[in-house]
Image (spheres, grey):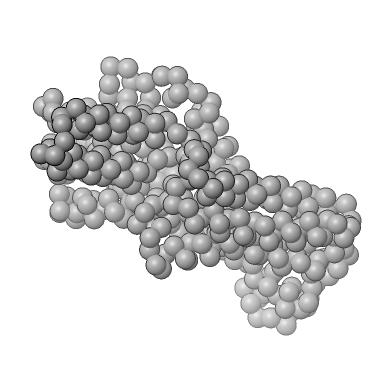
């Protein structure tokens, strides 16, 4: 039941905010690439991108007395690096490529056909504009989805799809210290299957899948604080150092409970090439709606609402993407901007979708005009 609801929630997100799904695909691909690099030495480069995607989609789990828990990518890499598991036994963990492909419902042929269909629609839309023929509001909106879904397809091309049965394994024997270290590396407990309240909650279908970089940033902050405590060992009393450690732990606990609206991968966010390109793709969705700037609307008010909403969506998503992490917590005046910008974006999307539906009652007859296709050789194909 929750799986179906999660797919429904993902569909709603893709319709309302396709650019965020594209960025999510980029972040998943980036995490998978990073995991391949980390595991290369321990697996003699036998660990491939499909394995990283499979583990990253929380499909590898270990048994517990109450059910099972997720083995996160950083946990699996740690098991390999510590020599607790051997890559030669990866098939027994359900990580052979044959098993993964057998569980996946992805079909390369279907993906190629889908890309072919949307490419054909895009080509026809371009030809209509070249012949000074208008596009309907629905066509303009459909066209806006294509570049974002195409880039998402590319990032997820070899990612397994709709894996219904995860690989559940027994963890190797570990010392108490090793077990504590392993458990502390878990990014989140919300996706475990131990039938706790938050795991069975319907709200879980809207959860953003946390990424390993979030845990790494948390660990980095903890290690930094520990270094400061060690450096002040000779200059401050033990009680002060203890309080600082307790305060840090309380801060970490509060951070884990806070509502995270967005959290971009630091490696991606700080890239001088990839992040501007990502922002460009983010703005492309609203920008492509401007194709219908001069399209006839039932009323001039609706036409200007469409124009204003398209411009607002471009500006608001660009502003929103300038914040590396957005949480529902007061941190100064910029907090208002970081939280208001996605609200403005969602409102503008609702206005544009409403404009498409409202325009059906009085469409211009010019949208039914066409050009002579026989003059173009591509139509023979």
Q: Quadrant of residue 118?
A: bottom right
Q: Give above or below for 231 relative to 34.
A: above
- Please state the horizontal and vertical placement of residue 48, each as a whole percent of the image: 27, 53
Q: Is residue 359 visible?
A: yes
For the C terminus, give its image quadrant: bottom right
Question: Is 72 left, or right, of 320 in this rendering?
Answer: left
Image coordinates of residue 328 in percent, x first then y, are 51, 38
Give whichever of 301, 103 is nearer the camera. Answer: 301
Query: In the rendered image of this protein, does residue 362 appear above or below residue 249?
Result: below
In the image, 247 versus 102, the foreground residue is 247
Residue 378, picture quadrant: bottom right
The residue that appears at 74% across and 73% down in the rendered structure is 128
Residue displayed at 39% across by 52% down: 265
Residue 106 in view (yes/no) = no
- Residue 207 drawn above or below residue 108: above
The front one of 4 and 354 is: 354
Q: Quadrant of residue 80?
A: top left
- The foreground one among 87 and 324 is 324
Q: Tell me residue 122's x, y (percent).
A: 64, 67
Residue 273 position within the rendered picture, expressed as x and y whole percent measured from the top left: 41, 68
| Name of the residue lying farthest toward the top | 65
Could you tell me which residue is drawn at 45 percent across and 19 percent down?
197
């Amino acid at each position: 039941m929750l799986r179906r609801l999660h797919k429904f929630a993902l569909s709603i997100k893709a319709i309302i905010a396709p650019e965020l799904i594209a960025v999510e695909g980029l972040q998943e691909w980036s995490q998978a690439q990073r995991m391949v690099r980390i595991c290369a030495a321990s697996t003699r480069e036998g660990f491939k991108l499909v394995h990283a995607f499979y583990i990253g989609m929380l499909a590898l789990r270990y048994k517990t007395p109450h059910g099972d828990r997720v083995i996160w990518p950083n946990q699996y890499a740690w098991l390999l690096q510590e020599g607790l598991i051997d890559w030669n036994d990866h098939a027994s963990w359900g990580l052979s490529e044959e098993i993964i492909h057998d569980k996946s419902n992805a079909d390369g042929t279907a993906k190629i056909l889908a890309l072919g269909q949307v490419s054909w629609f895009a080509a026809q839309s371009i030809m209509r504009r070249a012949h000074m023929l208008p596009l309907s509001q629905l066509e303009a909106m459909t066209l806006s989805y294509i570049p974002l879904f195409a880039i998402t397809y590319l990032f997820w091309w070899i990612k397994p799809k709709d894996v219904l049965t995860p690989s559940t394994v027994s963890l190797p024997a570990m010392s108490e210290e090793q077990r504590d270290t392993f458990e502390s590396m878990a990014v989140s407990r919300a996706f475990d299957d131990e039938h706790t309240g938050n795991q069975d909650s319907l709200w879980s279908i809207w959860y953003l899948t946390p990424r390993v970089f979030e845990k790494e940033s948390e660990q980095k902050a903890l290690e930094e604080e520990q270094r400061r405590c060690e450096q002040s060992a000779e200059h401050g009393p033990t009680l002060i150092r203890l309080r600082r450690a307790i305060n840090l732990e309380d801060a970490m606990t509060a951070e884990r409970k806070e509502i995270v609206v967005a959290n971009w991968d630091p490696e991606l966010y700080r890239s001088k090439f990839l992040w501007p390109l990502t922002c460009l793709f983010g703005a492309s969705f609203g920008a492509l709606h401007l194709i219908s700037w001069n399209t006839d609307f039932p009323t001039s008010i609706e036409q200007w609402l469409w124009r204003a909403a398209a411009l607002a969506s471009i500006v608001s998503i660009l502003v929103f993407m300038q914040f590396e992490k957005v949480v529902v917590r007061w941190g100064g005046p910029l907090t208002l901007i970081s939280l208001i910008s996605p609200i403005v974006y969602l409102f503008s999307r609702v206005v544009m979708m409403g404009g498409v539906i409202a325009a059906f009652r009085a469409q211009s007859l010019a949208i039914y005009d066409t050009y002579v296709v026989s003059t173009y050789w591509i139509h023979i194909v």
